[in-house]
Image (tube, rainbow, N blue to C red):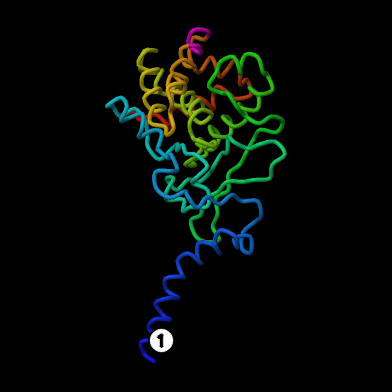
């Protein structure tokens, strides 16, 4: 009889792990708002997360950026502990699809959720890593600028901001390049700026040969038509005040 009881106990313990995951996945709406996206595959490196400041410092072998200011990821972090993606104070989702109610989030405690905000109201963001998108689609550029403005505002309010898209690669990569470039171009020549920002992009997961040159080419086109990334943003995102950009630079930059 004792052996049978031990067998039953072991059987239930073995079931407990899978059952807990299933309940967490399918039963989350009993204690969380609806439409939150839970990714059970979000553990470990599959989040494509990195601290942008730390990554760019490593790319240069110099400490130019403060860490713990900006993070980048893909959507697989959603539903996982916030510690996996740098414990952000604010999340900006670049992958919101018009007409969808899905929201991406991380959790500090079971009921302490950090839910991603989105700022594109009229178009689903795409192809931000191509200058032609910014030049030929004014609505898309305006939508992208809202997200960039929100990130800058969040940083200026002393928030640690995480931004993400689906893969954490191209939309995220373009925004990371623009924000990272704002700081680096104050102290480095263009070639060094492009090299460092491209280095960060090359760390992204799922980079096939057709994707690898995208951010490098985007930055070269930006510099070909603009004196700086700052003037690019001033041209395409006129609602972002120069004073806000300068404050963002001071916060993100590591200065002795």
How many marks on residues? Answer: 1
Compared with 218, 206 (above or below) is below
Residue at screen point 37% across, 90% down: 2
**Main SS type for the magenta part?**
helix
Q: Is residue 8 left or right of residue 100?
A: left
Question: Could you say which quadrant of the image residue 134 lies in?
Answer: top right
What residue would you read off at disc 1?
5
Q: Is residue 121 left or right of residue 225?
A: right
Q: Position of residue 211 (x, y in %)?
A: 46, 23
* Residue extending farthest left: 61
Q: Is residue 222 magenta?
A: yes
Q: Is residue 83 left or right of residue 232?
A: left
Q: Position of residue 56 (x, y in %)?
A: 36, 29
In this orientation, which residue lies closer to the viewer: 157 or 197? 197
Report crowding for label 1: few under 14, some 14 to 19, many 20 or more residues within 10 A (C-alpha): few
Please provide the residue range marked out in magenta.
221-225
Residue at screen point 61% across, 21% down: 237
* Residue extending farthest top: 224
Residue at screen point 41% across, 86% down: 5
Indicate the secondary structure of the residue bearing disc 1.
helix
In this orientation, which residue lies closer to the viewer: 114 or 201? 201
Q: Quadrant of the C terminus?
A: top left
* Residue extending farthest bottom: 1
Q: Quadrant of the N terminus?
A: bottom left
Q: Position of residue 78 (x, y in %)?
A: 52, 48
Q: Position of residue 83 (x, y in %)?
A: 42, 51
Compared with 32, 57 (above or below) is above
Question: Could you say which quadrant of the image residue 212 lies in?
Answer: top left
């Amino acid at each position: 009889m004792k052996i049978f009881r031990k067998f039953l106990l072991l059987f239930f313990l073995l079931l407990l792990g899978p059952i807990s995951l299933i309940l967490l996945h399918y039963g989350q709406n009993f204690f969380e708002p609806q439409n939150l996206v839970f990714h059970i595959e979000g553990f470990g490196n599959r989040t494509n997360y990195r601290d942008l400041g730390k990554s760019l410092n490593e790319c240069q072998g110099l400490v130019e950026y403060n860490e713990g200011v900006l993070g980048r990821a893909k959507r697989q972090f959603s539903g996982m502990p916030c510690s996996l993606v740098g414990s952000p104070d604010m999340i900006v989702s670049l992958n919101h699809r018009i007409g969808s109610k899905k929201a991406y989030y991380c959790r500090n405690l079971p009921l302490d959720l950090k839910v991603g905000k989105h700022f594109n109201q009229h178009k689903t963001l795409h192809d931000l890593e191509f200058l032609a998108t910014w030049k030929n689609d004014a609505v898309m550029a305006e939508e992208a600028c809202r997200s960039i403005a929100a990130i800058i505002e969040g940083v200026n309010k002393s928030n640690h901001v995480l931004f993400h898209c689906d893969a954490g690669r191209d939309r995220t990569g373009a925004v990371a390049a623009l924000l990272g470039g704002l700081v680096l171009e104050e102290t480095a020549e263009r070639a060094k700026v492009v090299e460092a920002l491209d280095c960060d992009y090359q760390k992204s997961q799922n980079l096939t040969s057709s994707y690898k040159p995208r951010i490098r080419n985007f930055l070269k086109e930006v510099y070909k038509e603009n004196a700086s990334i700052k003037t690019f943003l001033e041209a395409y995102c006129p609602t972002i005040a120069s004073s806000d950009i300068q404050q963002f630079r001071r916060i993100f930059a590591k200065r002795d």
